[in-house]
Image: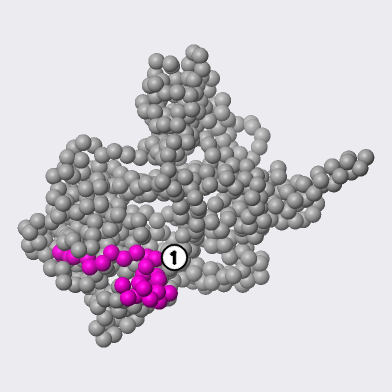
Amino acid sequence: MIPDREEDIFVPAEMTMGAMQGDTVQVRLLKGHDGPRTRGEVVRILERAVRVVVGTYFKNKNFGFIVPDNAKQNRDFFVDRAMAGGAMSGDKVRAEILRYGTDFENPTARITEVLGREDDPGVDMLSVLMEADIPLDFPEKVLNMAARIPDAPIPADFEGRLDLRDMMMVTIDGPDAKDLDDAVSLEKVGDEYHLGVHIADVANYVQAGSAMDREALKRGTSVYVPDRVVPMLPEKLSNGICSLNAGEERLALSCLMTLNHLGRVIDYKLAETVICVDRRMSYPDVKAILEDQDPVLTERDAAFVPMLRDMLELSKLIRARRWKRGAIDFNFPEPEFVLDENGAVLDIRAHEANCATELIEDFMLTANETVAKHFRKMKSPFVYRIHEKPDEDKVRRVLEYINREGIPAEVPADGNFSAKFCQQILRKVRKAPFERLVAQELLRSMAKARYSEEPAGHFGLAAKDYCHFTSPIRRYPDLQIHRIIKDELRGRLTPDKMEQYADFLPDVCEQTSMTEKRAADLERKCDKVKAAQFMKAHVGDTFEGHISGVTGWGFYVELPNTVEGLVPMSLLIDDYYDLNEDEHAIMGRLSGKMYRLGDVVRVRCKDVDTHLSTIDFEVADEYDKKNDTAGKRRRVADKN
């Protein structure tokens, strides 16, 4: 462990002392070595990060061993026959690590659970979730608490609440969504818009400090993978009394806002409410009504169409206002998996935003900003969602690249790399061949958004104030914010209470930032697993994609459906290629031919490793040349 050092230290495999990925270690630097990288050896393991291993079990006559799913755990785990737990060769298993081994001795483990055969439905996602140590089952005490919660609010719950049951409101979500935690309402009066964002009052059922609350904080967030959701709260709440189902009375926290003709919030009110959603609507249906003027759906939902049209009008005003102040939209597509009943991938599509998804996004962002601004002005302890300014040196490198490409882009006169400035850079390169390259490099220059008790603003949204208020079913920070709001509304935000919040909110921010990152990393890994399974059936097929990454060992190509694969250097047979970091390209030594980030290329799927979730492509032109040459040789040989 070497503090205040940014440079990576290379540790040879024989000098790790058996340390594993994620372990905290003490390292001694090695002197007198050749090569550009600093080298070291592990002299002490301070803290183990990995307690369990998930992988495939194999057994022979005298013992068994586990091949880990995680390629970074590059050593097999030996399993004594008495500790195999009835596992058979080829089973996916979860095992407790008994000994971590040394540089010269493999680690050992005891199998605690047999997950199933590798190709059994759901085992792939289950393995990834378990490897990440995501809690899949709720403790019995938490389930007992959930069981005691009623299926519907009781009349006593309505006391002291603003009654909005007669207000027209809808939920708009994905067709398969089950945890409906936000509803929206809108009434246009003259040139003013009265917008209501109504969020399930989860805090009414999850008491601070309870076993259910502690479990929710431990999880931090719900985890979404292609074939399932691992919820933050038991389904009794997330799909039941805290889900804003149409026609059912529900408790809510409402942010009631008045916006002017420019889409600016000019007045607002936060209130504990009782609501009753009139109609559950889906993104595809709302899009069909607003964009496609679908006659059947328009007639079916005739009572709601005027409100939806006003919502679209307001959404455009809000979005234009946010764009004017400098908000950045990178618009990188997310994968959408179509699965059969066994979890097999039938198709992968790029998820595309539409007027319905944008409408809900605009309303939720507006409510989040309004709530954050309210508590910043109060100077109350709070949980903010912050996104800090980018690394200026990295932004300067992006500007240098753009200038080399012939597009003038100067450092701002005041030296302020604002969100507005970054937005203007993206506008300058729109439709240029290297647009995606610039967007990716700008994104990499920025820190990850995180939770903080300090109101540092949100750079990407160009927002001075921002928080997460709108999803307490699936995010713990939102639940914590609801408690603070309710304390203020009920006059309980006393100096002593504020001091208590100030003491523990930093820990809440740190924990939930960590669990959010863990969930995001896991979701990306699950996407890679499903993408590899899908592409296994397409080995030999040809696709067109764009170069999404360039490295010293090859370049990555992303297909229109978001699937990404590597073209290794070894498969570029027409020349010897070197990495040119300044050009974000690899370049042929003899031909000068370049493959640059953002270039469109035609590739053939050459190989897929579903165990490692890797996809190898080769440039289709090179494949065609290679096979054409082989064919000529065969024809010459036949003639002779």
At label 1, which amino acid type do we have?
A: Ala
Query: On screen, 374 above or below 223?
Result: below
Which residue was labeled with disc 1?
353
For image coordinates 61% across by 68% down, the residue present is 432
- Give the x, y percent position of residue 210: 17, 43
**Which residue does the image show at 40% across and 56% down from the upper left?**
449
Please name the residue shown 59% across and 70% down the image: 431
In-image side of 458 versus 337 (left or right): left
Q: Residues within 10 Å of mark 1 (few under 14, many from 20)?
A: few
> Colour mode?
one colour
Assign the C terminus to one quadrant of the image. top right
Q: Front-most of 389 and 180?
A: 180
Instruction: Name the residue furthest bottom.
Output: 190
Most foreground residue, 619 or 295: 295
Is residue 355 shown to the viewer in this render? yes
> Where residue 352 appears, x then y in whole percent?
46, 63
- Residue 375 appears in the figure: no
Vertical side of 533 occupied by 106: above or below:
above
| Residue 330 lies in the magenta stretch | no
The picture places residue 633, in percent across and down from the top left corner, at 85, 43
Q: Is residue 191 above or below residue 593?
A: below
SS for dot 1: loop
Q: Is residue 107 above or below residue 468?
A: above
Q: Nearer the viewer, residue 92 or 541?
A: 541
Q: Nearer the viewer, residue 137 or 116?
A: 116
Q: Residue at x 15, y 68 (%)?
A: 165
Q: Is residue 289 magenta?
A: yes
- Displayed quadrant of residue 280: bottom left
Spot the residue most to the front.
296
* Magenta extent: 272-300
